[in-house]
Amino acid sequence: MDFSSWMSAIQERTERALERLLPAADVAPARLHDAMRYSTLGGGKRVRPLLCHGAGEILSAAPEALDLAACAVEMIHVYSLVHDDMPCMDDDVLRRGKPTCHVEFDDATALLVGDALQSLAFQTLAGPGVQTDAARQISMLHLLAQASGSRGMAGGQAIDLAAVGQQLNVRELEFMHIHKTGALIRAAVLLGAHAGNADDAALDSLSHFANRVGLLFQVVDDILDAEASTATLGKTAGKDAAQNKPTYVSLMGVADAKRLAADLLREAKTALEPLGPRAQRLAELADYIVQRTY
Ligand code: GRG
């Protein structure tokens, strides 16, 4: 199967799994469930589910187990987008090409959507079908909790909020992004590996790959924010500069940010080498992350 057919197949099965896992829109409390489905379904590139499946396939994980791990990570990701868009944080009106959750519904509903998606993510990952080895399943829960909490994504968001209008250097910017964006991307890869039979050597290679890809994702995101249009991105373009936020582009300029992306891509692929040809999908995914237009 070529990469683009594989990607469409994973996006499609992720959509179906999310539809199944999310409560129906007419189940009480209907407004909350409607808003959860509105925010989660029918949009997004599903980069984290793709990484989860790509890593899991290397380690012969069952596709159905990967669906559950991938959906858990995607739920955390959507929760972070819904909260990030709220007036008390980034205050945005457009996400995935449609009105943000708090605009379509209201602030209190958006807050609850994030809370409930976070809970559903852990319920999904703790449930049946994820791993037959209970100890490994507990490490998966631990991994996702750490990646999304104050030592991971939520901590990165706190650093981001504190950095508005501040002068950060590249090291400080990297520290922020390793937490805000990188931690969940790393979790997506490692959860895929843990859904299969990952040994320490494979986990080591994948962890190194994921660290590079996490940063790569953010560098490309900064370049797109500076260069792409709102229509293409499906979210407000140029926000970083408008909010005086430090980014790779503001610190080093577009040309150097593109060079950094090329270096990170090369390092990510080098990290995959010990895994051999089985890791081809992940290498292709790293290429996709650089080439994406939104
Ligand atoms: C509110 C706890 C909390 C955390 C928010 C990740 C995050 C932290 C906020 C998102 C804001 C943002 C635009 C970050 C830049 C990188 C990023 C995560 C972009 C969006 O991810 P994509 O491109 O989105 O994978 P889709 O819509 O394709 O899923």
Image: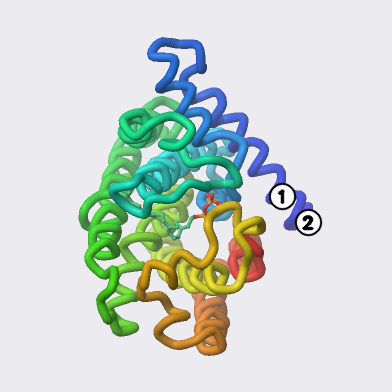
Residue 194 in the image, given as x and y percentages of width and height: 42, 48
Left or right placement of residue 13 versus residue 189 in this view? right
User: What residue sits right under mark 1 in the picture?
Assistant: 6
Quadrant of image for the C terminus: bottom right
The picture quadrant where one finds residue 229 is bottom right
Label 1 amino acid?
Trp
User: What residue sits right under mark 2 in the picture?
Assistant: 2
- CA gap, disc 2 and disc 1: 6 Å
Left or right placement of residue 132 versus residue 115 in this view? right
Is residue 69 visible from the viewing direction of this image?
A: no
Q: Is residue 174 above or below residue 194?
A: below
Q: How is the image coloured?
A: rainbow
The picture quadrant where one finds residue 178 is bottom left
Contact? badges 2 and 1 (CB < 8 Å): yes
Residue at the (73%, 57%) spot, across then down: 3
Q: Secondary structure at mark 1?
A: helix
Ligand 1 found in image quarter: bottom left
Residue 70 in the image, given as x and y percentages of width and height: 49, 42
Instruction: Please state which of residues 97 and 279 is positioned toward the viewer in this rendering.
Output: 97
